[in-house]
Image (cartoon, rainbow, N blue to C red):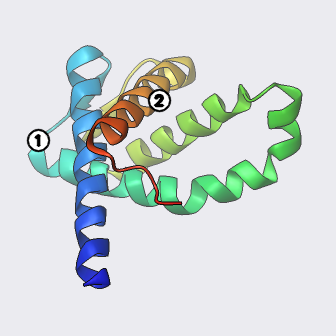
């Protein structure tokens, strides 16, 4: 039963990431997907990058994050988004780094609200 629960949670988080990226593409004209396959792959890779690479970067950059009172986390979020854009053919983000910071902030807030709404927060 636990394995099924893990699979369902994985699929739900993939869906939330995909939805967040799709909404970002609707809100910001600087985010574009060449088709649904690119969107689904971007949602999957964005989740994988955030689950694996982001925690490592957060630990490595903890002193900078403390000095900037947490604002450096916005930079890390933008880098995760830019990495996903770089890895997924058909996923385009125009406008440079600061636009990526703004879009990553939007995606983070949107994902947080969706996770809160559906009770998908990590169990403690």
Q: As drawn, is 45 to the left or to the right of 16?
A: right
In this orientation, which residue lies closer to the viewer: 113 or 32? 113
Closer to the eye: label 1 or 2: 2
Residue 48, position as x, y percentages in the image: 42, 60
Q: Quadrant of the C terminus?
A: bottom right
The residue tagged 2 is 104
Q: Residue 71, position in %: x, y? A: 71, 25
Neighbor class of circle 1 (other Cα within 10 Å; few <14, some 14-19, many 20+) is few
SS at circle 1: loop
Which disc number belongs to residue 113?
Answer: none
Task: Report if the CB atoms under discs 1 and 2 are less than 8 Å apart.
Answer: no
Specify the quadrant of the image occupied by residue 79.
top right
Residue 120 placement (x, y as % from top left): 34, 50
Q: Where does the N terminus fall, quadrant-wise?
A: bottom left
Q: Bin the neighbour count of mark 2 within 10 Å (Cα to Cα): few under 14, some 14-19, many 20 and up.
A: many
Q: Please say if 94 is above or below 122.
A: above
Q: Is residue 73 left or right of residue 59?
A: left
Which residue is at 32% across, 73% downward? Answer: 6
Q: Earlier in the sequence, mark 1 or mark 2?
A: 1
**Label 1 to label 2, Cα distance in Å?**
21 Å
| Residue drawn at x 29%, y 49% as measured from the top left | 43
Residue for badge 1: 35
């Amino acid at each position: 039963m636990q394995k099924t629960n893990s699979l369902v949670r994985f699929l739900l988080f993939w869906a939330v990431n995909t939805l967040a990226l799709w909404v970002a593409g609707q809100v910001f004209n600087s985010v574009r997907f060449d088709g649904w396959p690119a969107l689904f792959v971007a949602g999957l890779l964005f989740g994988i990058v955030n689950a694996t690479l982001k925690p490592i970067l957060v630990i490595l950059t903890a002193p900078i994050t403390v000095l900037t009172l947490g604002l450096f986390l916005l930079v890390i979020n933008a880098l995760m988004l830019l990495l996903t854009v770089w890895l997924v053919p058909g996923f385009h983000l125009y406008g440079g780094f600061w636009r990526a910071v703004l879009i990553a902030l939007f995606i983070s807030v949107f994902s947080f609200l969706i996770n809160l709404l559906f009770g998908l927060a990590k169990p403690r």
